[in-house]
Structure formats: C-alpha cells, structure tokens
Amino acid sequence: MNSDIKVVDIQTFKVPTRCRTPLKFGAVVVEELPIGYALVTVENRAGAVAQGWGAMFLMDLWAWPVSQATHEAKNRVMRDLLDAYARTVAGYGQYAHPIELFMETEAELRRLSREICARHTPGEEMPFLGALICASPVDHAVHDAFGRVNGIDSYRGYGPEHMSFDLARYLGPDYRGVYPSQFLRQDYLPQVPVFHLVGGLDLLRREEVTDAFPQDGTPNSLDDWIERDGVFCLKVKLNGRDLAWDLARTQEVARIYYEVQAERRPDLPAKPYLTADTNEQCESPEYIVEYLCKLREVAPRVYDEILYIEQPTERDLTAHRWDMRSIAQHKPVLIDESLTSVEEFQLAMELGWSGIALKSCKCLSSDLLFVPMAELARIPYAVQDLTNPSLALIESVGLAARTHTILGVEANSRQFFPAANALEAETHPDLYRVRDGVARTQTLAGTGLGMQVDKMDGFVAFVEQNEMG
C-alpha cells in the first residue's frame, strides 16, 4: 500500500503533573504522575513526510498496584520503557500499517519490559497492562502521523483501501475479510456523554468543602459539579470490602443528582446513569451479587439506574477463574484491567463476562482489534479513562466518538488535572469544558486523529521545557 508508513524518528517527553485534589481508586491514592508524550516522524511509500503526536499518563499506581517495589522505582520502569519502545519502533525500518507495526513489535515490548524491570525492580515484573500504557504514546503518535502523511482522517484508514491484510492475520481464520472499518463510524459523533468520576475521597455536598480545598472556581463537591457541568452519567468508585459503605455511597450519589435537578438544574435528564467500580477489590463475585441484591431491595430505583459493573475481582483471570454469570444475571459486568490480549478476551468470554472496557491507554491498535471482536461476539463495550489529561483526552474521546459504546466516555482529568488541559482546551474548548453533560467534538478535524496540535500555541515549547528526562 502506498499509504504504508516507515518511522523516521521518534522523540519522547515525560512531563510531571500534579493532582488538583487527590484521586482515590481501589487501594491507592494518586497525587503526582508524569504524562508521557511521543512525537513521531514518518514517511509513506510515495515519499511524503509528516509528524504525529501521542500522549498518555504513565500511571504505575493503576497498572501495577500490587508490588514490593516503590512508586518511584515502578514509574522509572515505565519512563524507561517508553523510551526503549520508541527506539524499537524507530528502528523497525520497514513500511507498514500502524496496526501491523504495533503487532509486529509487541513481542519486543514484552521483552523490553522484562529487561527494564530486572534493572529497576529485581525479582518483580510489571504487568503487561503497564507495558501497553508505556507504548500508548508512541502507538497513538504513529496513527496520527499515518493519517497526516496520507492526508486522511486516521479513522478512515482501517479498511482494505489502506490495509494490505485483514484481521485474520492476528485474530485467526474466523476474521477473514474482516477489517476494523466495518465497525467504526464514518465521522465523529457531534457530542458524547461524559461519565463523571465520584472517587473514594470526593466530597458529595457543598457544605462539606473547607478552606483546605482549592478556591479556584473549579467545583470541589459532586453537587456543584452536577450543577456546573450538567453531568448525568456518574461512575461511583466503591470500596469492595465494606458493603454498608458501598450501598450508602451509591444511594447518596443518586440522591444528590435528584436534589440538584429539583433545586438548581431542572433541565437535567429525568434520571442519572450510574456505573459501579471497585477496582478489583472484591474477594469474589459474590460480593457484587450481594451488593446488587441488597440495592434492589432497599433502593430499586437506584438499582435500575446502574448501567453496568466494572471489573470487581483481581486481574489475573486464571487465579480463581471466577465465573461472572452470577453478576451478569443482574447487571452487565465489564472486564477492564484483565483485558490486555486476544487470549484474555477469549478466556473472559468463557468465564461469562458480559462485555469489555476499551481504554486508549492500552494502545489504539489494540482497541481497533477489540472493537471487531466485541461486535462480532455481540457483547457491549465502553470507552473508559486513565484520568486522561492533555492530548490523551482527545485520543480517548475520539475513540468513543467513532465507535458504538454502551454510553459515552469517561473523562475525569477536568476534575483532577485541569491545569494539564489548559493549552489543549484553547483549541478544543467544548471537548475539555463539559456542558450539559457532554463533550462536543466539532474541533476534532483535519488529518490524523484530529488533535490539531499545530494550532495549540505554546504546546510544543511547554512539553520540551518541562521534560523531566
């Protein structure tokens, strides 16, 4: 294909970013992390040259939560792996489609992860989920550059017009004649509902806010967020080990929505959409079954408002081989942290998971394989967040706007890392500043992934000047 690309050069940057307020999920609290950026230069077979950008949070606290190693050691692994994988892709030296380039270097990504862990965390390996996060800035930058060098919207480049192979090459004979383009929207949805995160430490009511919280005009409590942004999709972080707390928290979140609707925002939708996430903290599926049964008993309306449950148990699917059908009888249960490979998708289907969570941090190339797998298996999927700030939010919202998700996209960097979005929000104001509960995509335009970095005054200088090395 003349549209195939060869990577000419890759530059990587790591920019430290602090939370506005701490983010608690599962058993960890996030306060400061680096964003990894990649700038990729490519040429196509016709000799044209272009650049593309990608970004992702290097969040070891989510990718690698259980460890004897320090946070600093684990994050050093991730920073080094970003650089090492970039060198691998830059040295690939062959023309290829972006999905092909990712799949052909995946084994080397795994090898590099083991090698770097041996240096910084002897005796302990990072889960492959962490390696995918490290590869994600490079992978997105390759996809962005692919579209830009060929003068196309990148999402229009995933069919037989631009791919010399079908998905049978990587997914097996059942996928002969199958291409990602068959399951993608031709254009971005004009608006995408945003799931607002209710973290474990988040305040729910205005009267709980003290002077210790930032007084910068950004809401500090759920009721004020609902009033300002009109959010009607709420993701509730649960404890997973304290049933009374989880039940009370879920009911209180719903109660606050209705209070704001009655007193401050009568234009809000008639009901909220809720999801519940314990971040793997449940010892078994039975905890969630008990949670749902009790919730239906004491608050049937709130039970009906729950759209799905996110991964309740540990990410190693083989550790207990939990059967998820007991949960799925009540509500869809989506696999998240466990989904990093085709084999894990297949095992999840055997174990009765209802659907999957896509995340841009697992690489766009992977997502473009998982979407056809989910669609052909007739299971639902959602696009979720890694508290994606900066360009990573564009990548995630763009993915949600080109696929057929259950509902919307999670986008919570505006809550916890708003400063990291400042430059990008000038170019994409209605994508970063949620109003009426939706992100608007009209500025996702032009070639590549629609990020329009060349219009972001000061962006490149900011990344270069704040690179931590």
Image: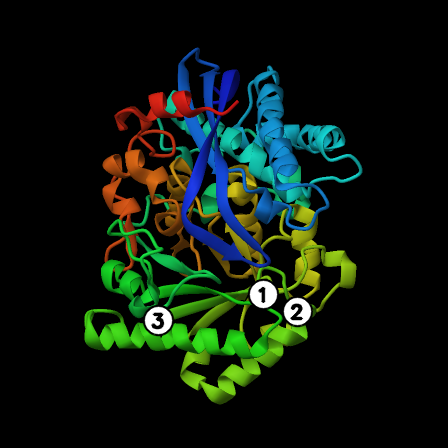
Q: Compare marks 2 and 3 and give the one earlier in the sequence.
A: 3
> Can you name the residue that lies furthest to the right here?
123
Q: Estimate the x, y position of residue 160 in percent, counting from the top left.
A: 49, 34
- Give the residue type that dot 2 points to: Met
The answer to whether residue 114 of the structure is visible from this angle is: yes
Using the image, tell me which numbered label, if any, was put on residue 240: none
Seen at 39% across and 72% down, the residue is: 253
Considering only vertical position in the picture, is 143 above or below 387?
above
Mark 1 or mark 3: which is in front?
3
Q: Estimate the x, y position of residue 225 in percent, counting from the top left.
A: 30, 61
- The residue that disc 3 covers is 272
Mark 2–mark 3 distance (CA, rounded to whole Å): 25 Å
Mark 2 or mark 3: which is in front?
3
Q: Estimate the x, y position of residue 342 in percent, counting from the top left.
A: 66, 47
Mark 3 neighbour density, 10 Å: few (under 14) some (14–19) many (20 or more): some
Using the image, tell me which numbered label, if any, was put on residue 324: 2
Question: Disc 3 on helix, strand or loop?
Answer: loop
Mark 1–mark 3 distance (CA, rounded to whole Å): 22 Å
Residue 286 located left or right of residue 433: right
Mark 2 or mark 1: which is in front?
2
- The residue that disc 1 covers is 354
> Can you name the residue that lies furthest to the front here?
211
